[in-house]
Image (tube, helix red, strand yellow):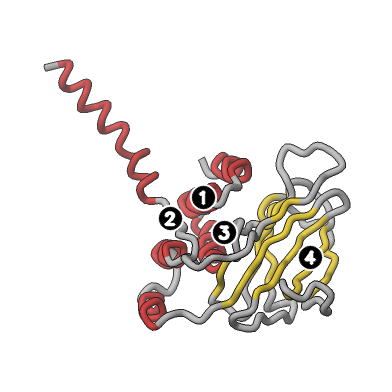
């Protein structure tokens, strides 16, 4: 009998971890083929964590004309951010701006709306964040939601249900924005969920760093 109770207690203790993992959002990449997206530049020095555009290795999607872009800044330094048409590298950039070092390192948000940058639907853009030693690039394309997705989103205005739905539907940039804002306000659960999404697109070191922050 004591042995049975021990097994039951062990199972109960294991449930929260399993439940937590099952509860994490799952990013499903778009079904359509797309060129390679995230590109990491070379460095002239060692860093524990890289400067990185928080973008998948394929063209990520957004429903927003003026989405937020996110990048990871491992050290206090200024960066340059540029947004260009992906297929016209010599065209005038939509954005090319230097930013002063932020108050805190880690994940940074860049509001395209505040910078007056608007993405045309169906057009691919390449965005790059760089400092004096390295750079990282992501790809983004704005799409119009299907009627079914628009209906589903109307029923979940914000929070966990919304970023879970966006991730499941393959809308990377909007899912990341929703979960990041939830992490800012609600804390640990959303922070761990953001780490799970970053891990799913291959940013494992940054994901591990984020999980430690929200333990």
Residue 200 is tagged as 1
Q: Few, some or many C-alpha atoms within 10 Å of disc 1 (few <14, some 14-19, many ≥20)?
A: some
**Image spot of residue 136 (x, y percent):** 74, 55
| Residue 151 relative to residue 189: left or right | left
- Measured Cα–Cα span from mark 4 to mark 1: 24 Å
The span from disc 1 to disc 2 (Cα, nearest Å) is: 8 Å
Foreground pick, 67 / 160: 67
- Of mark 1 and mark 2, the one earlier in the sequence is 2
Total count of labels: 4
- Location of residue 39 by image quarter: bottom right
| Separation of residues labelled 1 and 3 (CA atoms) | 21 Å
Mark 2, residue position: 26
Please give left or right for residue 203 compared with residue 194 in the image.
right
Residue designated by label 3: 184
Which residue occupies the foreground of this view, 196 or 180?
Answer: 196
Q: Where is residue 102 in the image (x, y as percent from the top left)?
A: 77, 57
Quarter placement of the N terminus: top left
What's the distance in space between the residues labelled 3 and 4, CA to CA?
23 Å
Judged left or right of residue 134, residue 39 is: left
Identify the mark nearer the N-term, 3 or 4: 4
Residue, x 43% and y 67% (percent of image)? Answer: 169
Q: How crowded is mark 2: few (under 14 residues within 10 Å), some or many (20 or more)?
A: some
Q: How crowded is mark 4: few (under 14 residues within 10 Å), some or many (20 or more)?
A: some
Furthest-left residue in this view: 1
């Amino acid at each position: 009998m004591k042995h049975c109770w021990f097994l039951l207690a062990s199972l109960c203790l294991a449930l929260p971890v399993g439940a937590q993992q099952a509860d994490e959002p799952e990013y499903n990449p778009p079904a359509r083929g797309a060129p390679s997206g995230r590109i990491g530049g070379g460095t002239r020095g060692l860093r524990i964590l890289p400067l990185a555009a928080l973008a998948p290795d394929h063209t990520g999607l957004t429903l927003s004309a003026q989405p937020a872009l996110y990048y990871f800044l491992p050290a206090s330094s200024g960066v340059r951010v540029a947004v260009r048409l992906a297929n016209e590298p010599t065209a005038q950039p939509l954005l090319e701006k230097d930013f002063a070092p932020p108050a805190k390192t880690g994940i940074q948000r860049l509001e395209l709306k505040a910078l007056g940058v608007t993405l045309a639907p169906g057009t691919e853009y390449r965005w790059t964040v760089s400092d004096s030693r390295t750079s990282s690039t992501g790809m983004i394309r704005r799409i119009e939601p299907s009627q079914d997705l628009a209906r589903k989103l109307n029923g979940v205005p914000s929070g966990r249900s919304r970023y879970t739905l966006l991730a499941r539907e393959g809308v990377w940039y909007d899912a990341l924005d929703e979960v990041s804002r939830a992490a800012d306000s609600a804390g640990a659960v959303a922070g761990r969920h953001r780490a799970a999404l970053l891990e799913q697109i291959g940013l494992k070191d940054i994901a591990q760093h984020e999980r430690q922050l929200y333990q």
